Structures are given as C-alpha cells and as structure tokens.
Image (cartoon, rainbow, N blue to C red):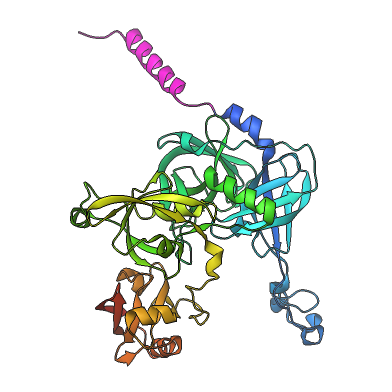
C-alpha cells in the first residue's frame, strides 16, 4: 500500500512540531536575567620594570627593533596585564559573585553591565578551596538573580549559562546536567566542592558566570572546563548553589571561610573490601589513618572504620565525605554512622575547623614546585616519622597530572624513602637526587604506602 504524499507530509510536520514543542524556550530566562549578569575586567600589577637609567635610546634603535620597545625604551612586558571573566549580582546593594581565579592577585577590578554601565569593584573576600570570590560595587537598586535549591537539580535537566567567553560579551549557551557531585581535587589535592558536570559550552571568560535552571534560578557558578585544545569539548563544571550560599555568607560576614574538619585519611571501598568489612555492597569511606588529637581521634574513630553516614548524609563514595564535612559549621556536634568489625554503630563527633590545622600537615620546607618526576614533597612531620619508625623521610603532597609520577599512580600521602640508591631523609636529599637525573633516565623509587613498602620505576621525560 502506497502512502499518499500529502499524508506523509502531514506526519513529518506533526513529528517536527512535537520535537520543537519538547525543547525548552530560553528566551524569557535570558531576557529576565541578563541585566544581572556582569562582565569582570581585571588589571594585574605591572611586571617588574627596569629603572629609567637602564632604558634604551629608542631613536637610536634600528627600525626593525623598534617594534619590540615602547618610545621610552622599555620592553612591552611592563605594560598592564589584564584578563576578564563573568559574574552576577546577588543583592541590589552591589554584592557580586565570581570565581576566585578571576580576580585573585588583581590590582584593579571593574564590573560592566549589559547596559554598558561600569563600576570599580572592591574584593570583599576570596576562597581558594571553593574558587569563589565576593565583590562589592557602590550602587543601589541593581537587578539581582535568585539562588535555587540544590536538591531540586537532577541529571538530565536542562541548564543555561550566560557569560563572556573569549570576550564575546553576554553570550548564552545551553545543555544538560551530565553528572552531580564530581570530585575535582585542587592543586593541593583538596576537594571540598561537589561539582555539577554539564555539557554546556563553557570557554575562557565564562568563569564566574551563572548556571540557570529552567525556572531562571541560579543552580551553580561556572568554574572549570576539561579540554585538550583550550576550547569547550562538552565537559564543564560548576560550583553548586549549596556551596555558593555557604561561602558567600561567610565572605560577606567576615571576609574569610571556615570549613568543618574531621582529621582522617580515607579511601574508597571496592567489592573485596566490602565483603571483608561485612557490607552488603561497596559504599562508604574507609578510614586509613586518624590524625592525632583531631576531632575524629577525640570521638574514637579508628583506622579500619567505614563511615557510612555523616550528619544524616549517606556517604556513597569516599570523595563525598570531604564535601559533607566541609559544609558543617565548626564546633557542631553531629552523628556518624559507621561499620566496625562487622557491626554498625553510631557515635557523636564535634567537628573541628579546617583552619585550626594552620597547615600543620604541610611542612614549611617543601619542594617549590613539581620537578622532573611531577612530585611536590614535604618533610614528614614528627608524628608521621614516629608512626613510621623512621628518622627522616619526605611525603608526597601533590602529583602533577600527565607526569611520570601520575602515570605510575603515585599518590599523595606516599612516603619517599629512596630515589635510586640514595636514601631520602629530607627535602634537600630529595632535590639533590632529582637534580642528578638525566632526561630519559629511569629510576627506581622506594615508597611506603599506608606503611607497606613498594618500589616503582619512574622515567624522566626527554623534553
């Protein structure tokens, strides 16, 4: 049976209309909220310049060299450096949210609105761990955005971003929520933000801009992208509104942020470990060590405990625990449900303040930056040395991505005791051993991981 062309045409038209009807219309969200989205313009301090008596005689320079110098004989490097990002107005009296990395170390910050009004901004507070910053401009009756409810956001939901990618002011992009609660460790390997992953096109310049749901509420602050090219490949990450609320409130009240601190080292539970600990399935955070005199130590948490629930929040994976603990106000007493020796029990913990450690777990004598092997190390604390029974050692505090150490899965917290045949008892020993390595050379490195010794082979890059 042949279907008449007019019937086929009607079917195609009906299907296309249904498809269009199923797609959201973002125009009202953009129209209503764009006035409260801002472009952040940042000037950084000038690079160190030579004194005037060290400047060159510009007129005496050959023509082909003059393009490398200013008329006063100074190289262009002394010129003001600048960058840009995005942000949004949180209150009508001039408080503005953006990313920490957008305005950190800025000499001058300006805020530009869609109507081209421009204001100088004061940095009220910065928070490196959440990558959030709070600014203030001298203005009243400003348009504002509304923060949504974190529990309402779901994977697969449509979301919308407004920002200034590559300086293209107030661009709009849309996509869906790809995942929730992503853990992306910082440079110091701390992860206190359960990022929202989306496929919204985010590029340099979008940082600090709002992520909206279909109600026009802010559900996140765009912060990071994963890319090999420098442009969007559909992997972008936003700071969830639950973290934004907490951090902004503290920055506005005190200019700084305090986070809850437990004082444990944790690891994930796999199937074999779950069976060994009497769990029905892999879940929770396995405590691998407890810091002496920490809140966990005071509460009686032990190595080998599996934390299943913290302050009423179920802990599915170990990476979730720092997110939950970090949002709890220091000094609060909370209930912790855990598995110990095959049976569940509930204990109370008085949460400490992360700042109370004063960086005690990062020694002052540390390698300045990642070396040939991609490791940043620090000398082990007296407590760590006592626990390990060593006179001296260094502890891995950071592993650079795409480095020899990362390829061989060296972990933060690993204790380096030997590089090649050289014993390592201090950072100076470590730096001296690394300095002797040639490009392309392979070297055995002896580690202690959770007290167990192992050797790994690392190869120095040829570049």
Depth check: give the residue in front, 288 or 83: 288
Magenta range is: 1-25
Percent from the top left, x then y, of residue 145? 64, 37
Quadrant location, the N terminus:
top left
Q: Main secondary structure of the magenta part?
A: helix
Percent from the top left, x then y, of residue 459? 31, 79
Percent from the top left, x then y, of residue 446? 29, 82
Residue 218 horizontal side relative to residue 407, left or right: right
Depth check: give the residue in front, 280 or 16: 280
Q: Is residue 10 magenta?
A: yes
Residue 197 horizontal side relative to residue 121, left or right: left
Place residue 178 in its image quadrant. Answer: top left
Residue plotted at (58% across, 51% down): 207
Residue 179 can be seen in this image? yes
Q: Is residue 25 above or below residue 174?
A: above
Residue 380 can be seen in this image? no
Percent from the top left, x then y, of residue 54? 77, 86
Q: Is residue 63 magenta?
A: no
Q: Is residue 237 above or below residue 211?
A: below
Residue plotted at (29% across, 91% down): 421
How many numbered discs? 0
Depth check: give the residue in front, 227 or 221: 221
Quadrant location, the C terminus:
bottom left
Residue plotted at (51% across, 47% down): 238
Q: Is residue 167 above or below residue 426?
A: above
Q: Is residue 218 above or below residue 107?
A: above
């Amino acid at each position: 049976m042949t279907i008449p062309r007019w019937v086929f045409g009607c079917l195609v038209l009906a299907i296309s209309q249904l498809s269009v009807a199923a797609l959201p219309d973002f125009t009202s969200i953009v129209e209503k909220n764009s006035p409260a989205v801002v472009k952040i313009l940042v000037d950084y301090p000038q690079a160190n310049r030579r004194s005037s008596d060290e400047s060159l005689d510009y007129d005496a320079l050959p023509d082909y060299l003059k393009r490398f110098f200013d008329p006063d004989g100074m190289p262009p490097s002394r010129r003001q450096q600048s960058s840009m990002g995005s942000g949004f107005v949180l209150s009508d009296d001039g408080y503005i949210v953006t990313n920490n990395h957008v305005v950190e170390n800025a000499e001058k910050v300006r805020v530009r609105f869609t109507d081209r009004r421009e204001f100088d901004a004061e940095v009220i507070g910065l928070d490196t761990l959440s990558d959030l910053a709070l600014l203030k401009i001298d203005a009243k009756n400003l348009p504002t955005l509304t923060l949504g409810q974190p529990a309402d956001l779901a994977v697969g939901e449509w979301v919308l971003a407004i920002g200034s990618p590559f300086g293209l002011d107030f661009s709009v992009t849309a996509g869906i929520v790809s995942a929730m609660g992503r853990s992306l460790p910082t440079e110091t390997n701390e992860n206190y933000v359960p990022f929202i992953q989306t496929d919204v096109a985010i590029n340099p310049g979008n940082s600090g801009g709002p992520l909206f749901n279909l109600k026009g509420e802010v559900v996140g602050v765009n912060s990071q992208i994963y890319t090999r090219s420098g442009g969007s490949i559909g992997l972008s990450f936003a700071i969830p509104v639950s973290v934004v609320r907490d951090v902004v409130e503290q920055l506005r009240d005190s200019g700084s942020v305090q986070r809850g601190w437990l004082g444990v080292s944790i690891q994930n539970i796999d199937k074999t470990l779950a069976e060994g600990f009497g769990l029905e399935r892999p879940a929770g955070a396995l405590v691998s060590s407890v810091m002496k005199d920490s809140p966990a130590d005071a509460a009686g948490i032990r190595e080998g405990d599996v934390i299943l629930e913290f302050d009423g929040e179920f802990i599915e994976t170990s990476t979730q625990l720092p997110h939950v603990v970090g949002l709890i106000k220091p000094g609060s007493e909370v209930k912790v449900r855990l598995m110990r020796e095959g049976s569940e029990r509930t204990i109370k913990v008085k949460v400490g303040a992360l700042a109370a450690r004063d960086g005690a777990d990062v020694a002052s004598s540390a390698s300045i930056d990642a070396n040939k092997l991609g490791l940043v190390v620090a000398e082990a604390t007296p407590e760590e040395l006592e626990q390990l029974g060593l006179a001296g050692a260094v502890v891995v505090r950071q592993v650079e991505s795409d480095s020899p150490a990362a390829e061989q899965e060296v972990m933060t917290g690993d204790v380096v005791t030997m590089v090649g045949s050289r014993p390592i008892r201090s950072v100076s020993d470590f730096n001296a051993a690394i300095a002797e390595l040639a490009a392309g050379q392979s070297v055995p490195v002896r580690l202690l991981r959770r007290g167990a010794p192992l050797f790994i082979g690392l190869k120095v890059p040829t570049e």
